[in-house]
Image: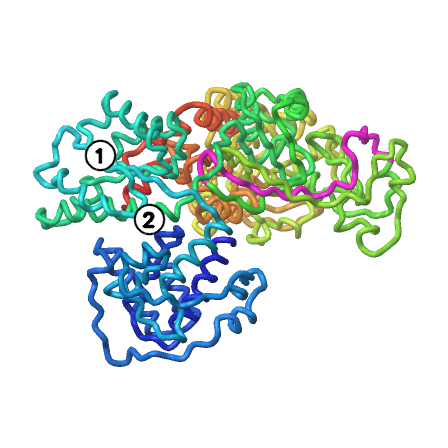
Amino acid sequence: MKEKRVALSLIAYLLQLFKGRDDVRKLARISVRLGKETGLDADVLCREFVRLSDSTICAGAEFVVSAAAGKGIRLDTVEIVDRPGMKSQSYPSAMEMFAEGPADQMVPVLATAELSSVPVEDSSAADAAGGVRDYSSDDGAARGTGSEIDAGASERLMTEIFAQQVAAPAERVGVYICECGTPGNDVVRVDELRQYVVNVPGVVNVQTLAMLCSETGAEFLRRDVRERKLTRMVIGVFLPRRHEADVRLLARETGIAIQMVNLNGLRQDNSWTLRDYTKYTARAGECLRTAAQNGAAVEALPSRSDENVLVIGAGVAGISAALALQERGRSVFLVERQPVIGGTVGRLNVVDASGQRAAELLRPTLARVLRHERIEVLTNSEVVSVSGRQGNFMVKVKVRARFVDPKACIGCGICSGVCPVSVRNEGNEQLDNRRAIYIPSAGAPQTAVIDRETCRRFNGKECVACRENCAYDAIDYAQQDEIRELRVGAIVIATGLGTFDFWRAAQFGFGRVKQVYSGMQFARLLDREGPTAGMLTLANGQPPAHVVMVHCAGSRSERFNNYCSGVCCTYMLQFTKVLKQKFPDAAVTHLVYDFCVPGRDAQALFSEISQCGGVDIRRMRDADSVQIEEHAGGVKVTYRGTLGGTQALNADIAVLAPALEGAPGAESLAQLCGLTVDKYGFTATVHSALAPVMTPVAGIYAAGCCRGPVDIATAVSQGQAAAGLIASSAGKNREAVFAGESSPLAVETMCC
């Protein structure tokens, strides 16, 4: 803002100076001169002049400045030819114009400054007498009248103003051109490139090196940077990718921010794009000069924040990444949208072919995450903005108030017992009710949280029942949402999965037929910590005699999702095993399009279930043919068989295996991170086989079901893989996977 204010001050003064004039070259020359003296871009000065005055004279000046700077032409050699229509205009008073604008754009010194014209006939005499030379005139003499202000005085005043208000250090640029063993001198003349950059403002040294990649060349650069106190470097090489690692190392050793080093390709991705080889040298020289000129607009980012990592999503993939990172000495921010960590797996009854319960499997791991000194868990939170780049991401996280102190709450549940509000419980898949203040059904920490959307107190009604009955003073209605700003070096996206919305497919009867359940609902019904304490009974109080398992509900379908979710068959077999253990006489029928049971353990489970008495496996032609209706207190399932005929069967309960899709909110998060999602909501990665956790954005990784349906073991492996890439050099130098993938430094090089 300060530099913008100074720029506008200069424009205001120039408006006064050239009120009624039509000398385009004078305005252009003073703009360039002021730009050199103050460090402000002359193009910016002229553009602001045009915007504020709407003058064709200023537009002509802008054209002159831009053209001269772009071609490397000294402005004092440019001849201005008057064109029809370029007439002087009457400008409004600069002070009146700025009085109507924002107050922070006013500079008081301009309002009180008294400037006088100092006509000087001879520049040397004027300098000796302490006068001010008029740089705007051709011969050095002031051509103004008594009512005009000396342009030389304007330069001096503007320089003083800028020095007082900004006092920015002068830029010192070093340009180094590597001959690379002269392999390209047949097309790019290295010895001719010097002339393109030697006169660029700020360039203090232009040097040609025989071999930049040699230790001699590297030592020369390190010494030259220290001795000349360079603030920016431009390095021209023939093969930029080969030298990228060396340049990064050089930047770290010399203390120059990597953003202030431009690795410029002279041949590859540059001059070779031209068909006329006679223009190769000119093209390389122009790109080198552009790199030296444009660096003034580049700002160095703060020091790298590689030690901190943000993991978004606290399911098994996110937890695995966080634990692996802390073992490598990294500090981790673990952000979870839900009030508890554990993800989808934490709500399952059984999680693998062995039949082990999720709560038993995850409980020690969750406790370790919550208590670890290098892992900060932010539950009830979501990411609202992401900026920066690899090594320096600035992430804003909105932490929603729980209105309960988690350190004081012991999870006794007394507050829930006295709460007068009852709503459907999403933690148990809407199968029972919860209170406005509740303890989540599964996951950790098992402490209370207040749902402000349903709580009476936050909806205009007075209620303090929970606070009055809390013996530990854990209820705090005064808590506020807060925005946390986290500076991290890398980000792992592990937001998990969503499931197919059965309301899109009325044929399955979900929500319409009472005894139709989704796979997640059935898992909660079988869990002894679920809404029925693991007791599965019908409306008449009897256990089910026949259960139908409908596979591929929403998967492998041309209407909905044309892919296989990969894990549904396994957990449906697990449901069957638990059912047969609870109700040995119950019949179970699997309607399958095709069985998918990858892995050794899953195949063993399939063999066990298929040989079990009372289990029938039927193939259907396609899942879209399934129709479920209510029948005699149970369900009637019709489907098209493999031979094309319609078949039907009656059962007490139907269980649907929904397609796995991207998590809700995955698209908005991807947009914040500069990523994309496919039509199913899964985050795009570089390559599903060769780089399964790397995204197109350097420093951001994806693990688990956010990038596609995977089983628990694969999700854990991907979380650990992302942590390994972050902790290793492969996470910082994206060189090894594809020739087309490059780090931000290489991208900037190829755009030159």
Q: Residue at x 66, y 20 (%)?
A: 364
Q: Residues within 10 Å of mark 2 (few under 14, many from 20)?
A: few
Q: Residues within 10 Å of mark 1 (few under 14, many from 20)?
A: few
Residue type indicated by callout 1: Gln
- Along the line of sight, which residue is nearer the eye, 198 or 26? 26
In the rendered image, residue 259, in percent from the top left (x then y), is placed at 39, 39
Mainly helix, strand or loop, the magenta region?
loop
Give residue 207's mark: 1
Residue 646, visible in the rendered structure: no
Q: Residue at x 24, y 59 (%)?
A: 75
- Along the line of sight, which residue is nearer the eye, 703 or 649? 703
Give residue 613's mark: none
In the rendered image, residue 467, in percent from the top left (x then y), is placed at 88, 40
Vertical relation: 397 (above or below) 38: above
Vertical relation: 2 (above or below) 91: above
Mark 1 or mark 2, which is nearer the start of the sequence? 1
Residues in magenta? 389-414
Mark 1: which secondary structure?
strand
Q: Quadrant of residue 487?
A: top right
Residue 79, visible in the rendered structure: yes
Q: Residue at x 34, y 75 (%)?
A: 21
Q: Pointer 2: what residue?
A: 294
- In front: label 2 or label 1: 1
Mark 2: which secondary structure?
helix
- Along the line of sight, which residue is nearer the eye, 485 or 475? 485
Q: Quadrant of residue 29?
A: bottom left
Residue type indicated by callout 2: Asn
